[in-house]
Amino acid sequence: MYLKIGKVSQKVGLSIKRIREYEKEGLIKPMRGETSNQRLYGSFEISRIMQIKQLIHERGLTVTGIKTLLNLAPCWTVFNCKETGICPAYKFPYNRCWELKERFKEEVACMGECVKCPIYLAIVEKVPPLFEKTPKEA
């Protein structure tokens, strides 16, 4: 079941504007309706919003601080994951979970789509691959 942004706002106790800021900063990536283009949030996105809210309001991090942390720390430490024992990302901490999903064809504990994960969004979409050829080499 997917919720529109107004219902999500009520559920998580944040303003619509704040949720849109999280999206703009690349911390969440809701689905878009096929015909309406409205933001639609599933349980994965809602749980990430609540985790981001906790990092900001209870741990005192800023959005920039969260993005930096996502680049440096394993996902289970950032999001205080309770499923570490069954997750391949915990067993192989030097690999990114989406790499493990491809390599071992195993599901990670969060069960969300990698392309919607804040860690994936912070790293993959913002940082070019290390060994990508420069325009001069191409």
Image (cartoon, rainbow, N blue to C red):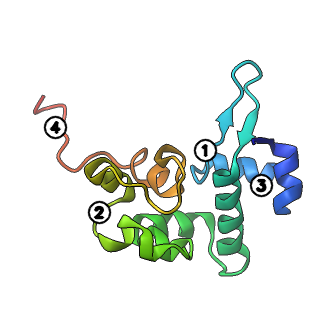
Q: Which label's residue is closer to the chain start, 3 or 4?
A: 3
Name the residue rendered at 84%, 53% in the picture: 9
> Is 9 situated left or right of 57 in this image?
right
Q: Position of residue 127 (x, y in %)?
A: 36, 49
Q: Residue at x 70, y 73 (%)?
A: 54
* Mark 2 residue element: loop
Q: Residue at x 38, y 72 (%)?
A: 90
Residue of label 1: 29
Nearer-N-terminus badge (4/2): 2
Secondary structure, mark 3, is helix
Q: Nearer the viewer, residue 4 or 61?
A: 4
Discs 1/2, front: 2
Residue furthest to the left:
137
Instruction: Determine whether label 4 and label 2 are within 8 Å by CB.
Output: no
Mark sitting on residue 133? 4
How many residues crowd around disc 3 within 10 Å: few (fewer than 14), some, or many (20 or more)?
Answer: few
Say which of marks 4 and 2 sits in front: 2
Relative placement, left or right, of 73 versus 8 is: left
Would you name the residue on which mark 3 appears? 18
Residue 23 in the image: state x and y as whole percent. Answer: 65, 47
Labels 1 and 2: the sequence-earlier one: 1
* Among numbered discs 3 and 2, the one appearing first in the sequence: 3
> Dot 4, crowdedness within 10 Å: few (<14), some or many (≥20)?
few
Q: Which residue is mark 2?
A: 95
Q: Do the numbered discs 3 and 1 sit on residues whose CB atoms are within 8 Å?
A: no
**Mark-to-mark CA distance, 4 and 1:** 29 Å
Q: CA distance from mark 4 to mark 2?
A: 23 Å
Between circles 4 and 1, the one closer to the viewer is 1
